[in-house]
């Protein structure tokens, strides 16, 4: 038996924030200045229009090599009459390496389906970008004891027909919808239990070797500096996806350090 070592992942999902590019650059520069740790892979996911200017900042400053950029969404077609959409190639061209896919806010407000998530995952892997696939149950589903069913279902649909090459990475973010943006994170044992279920679901689809080498599973939902350690301390949790707290520089520094 052997163990694969991954750096812990910290994904900052800025959502539709900050309101100006100037503020975005300021936050980005403060992160560069104040974060000393080199043991965490930091993936910053700003709104689309900030990706290019921030990518330029990454090139001109001596920003930590473990800092990367991710988009908050992508479209599955390469080009054409798809008003308002952005393709994988466009993201790659401006230095983006990761893409959040199937965030619950997109599923809820933009009616994104599991089928759409699946198409986006395939398009992303085809061009060698790393998908961050978000899954998780609603409060009602949890109360009706449907959590495991939802997890299996979302994983199976997101990864249906998806072949993963040896050198490709996939991140799965377990984000219970009722914990996102509410200030009520879940108990870390409960997160660990869900993540184990996610692992079983993936093992049903791929070889154990591939699951160990190519998949990372993280937790998201009201993570902040007071609770991050309880999640990171769980052996199956490879990192965190942080929304609200990722916009507060002091919180970010405390969480990463
Ligand atoms: C998120 O945006 O996926 C998220 C986890 O947000 P928050 O940390 O604010 O709950």
Image (cartoon, rainbow, N blue to C red):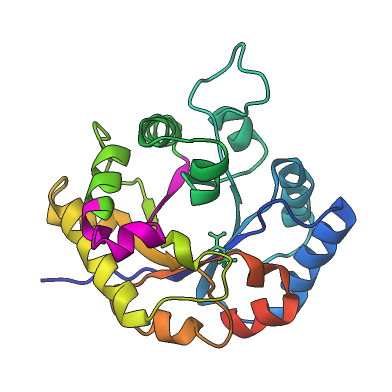
Residue 10 in the image: x percent, y percent?
53, 68
Q: Between 221 and 6, which is closer to the camera in this rendering? A: 221
Is residue 138 found inside the magenta-colored segment of the image? yes
- Give the magenta-colored segment's residue range: 129-149
Q: Which quarter of the rendered picture does the N terminus lie within?
A: bottom left
Q: Is residue 160 visible?
A: yes
Residue 225 in the image: x percent, y percent?
58, 84
Q: Seen in the image, is 56 located left or right of residue 132? A: right
Q: Seen in the image, is 185 located left or right of residue 94? A: left
Q: Number of numbered discs present?
A: 0
Residue at image x 27%, y 67%? Answer: 194
Q: Would you place residue 187 above or below residue 78 in this image?
A: below
Q: Is residue 175 visible?
A: no
Q: Quadrant of ligand 1?
A: bottom right
Is residue 167 found inside the magenta-colored segment of the image? no
Residue at image x 47%, y 41%? Answer: 129
Q: Between 157 and 207, which is closer to the camera in this rendering? A: 157
Quarter of image, res 187: bottom left
Residue 243 in the image: x percent, y percent?
60, 64
Q: Between 86 and 135, which is closer to the camera in this rendering? A: 135
Q: Seen in the image, is 94 located left or right of residue 228? A: right
Q: Would you place residue 238 above or below residue 61 in this image?
A: below
Q: Between 179 and 163, which is closer to the camera in this rendering? A: 179
Q: Would you place residue 171 above or below residue 37 in this image?
A: above
Residue at image x 85%, y 51%? Answer: 21
Q: Seen in the image, is 245 located left or right of residue 119? A: right
Q: Which quarter of the rendered picture does the C terminus lie within?
A: bottom right
Residue 98 in the image: x percent, y percent?
52, 48
Q: Residue furthest top?
A: 81
């Amino acid at each position: 038996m052997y163990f694969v070592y991954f750096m812990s992942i910290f994904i900052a999902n800025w959502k539709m924030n900050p309101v100006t590019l100037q503020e975005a650059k300021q936050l980005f520069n403060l992160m560069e200045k104040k974060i000393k740790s080199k043991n965490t892979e930091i993936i910053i996911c700003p709104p689309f229009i900030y990706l290019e200017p921030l990518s330029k900042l990454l090139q001109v400053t001596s920003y930590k090599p473990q800092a990367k950029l991710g988009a908050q969404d992508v479209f599955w077609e390469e080009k054409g009459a798809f008003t308002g959409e952005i393709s994988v190639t466009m993201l790659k061209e401006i230095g983006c390496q990761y893409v959040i896919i199937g965030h619950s806010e997109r599923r809820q407000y933009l009616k994104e389906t599991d089928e759409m998530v699946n198409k986006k995952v395939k398009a992303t892997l085809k061009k060698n970008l790393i998908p961050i696939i978000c899954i998780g149950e609603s409060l009602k589903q949890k109360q009706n004891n449907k959590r495991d069913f939802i997890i299996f279902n979302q994983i199976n649909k997101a990864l249906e027909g998806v072949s993963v090459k040896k050198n490709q990475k996939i991140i799965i973010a377990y984000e219970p919808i009722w914990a996102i943006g509410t200030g009520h994170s879940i108990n870390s044992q409960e997160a660990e239990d869900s993540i184990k279920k996610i692992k079983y679901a993936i093992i049903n689809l791929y070889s154990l070797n591939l699951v160990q080498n190519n998949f990372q599973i993280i937790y998201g939902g009201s993570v902040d500096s007071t609770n991050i350690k309880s999640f990171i301390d769980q052996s199956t949790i490879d990192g965190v996806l942080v929304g609200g707290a990722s916009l507060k520089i002091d919180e970010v520094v405390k969480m990463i350090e």
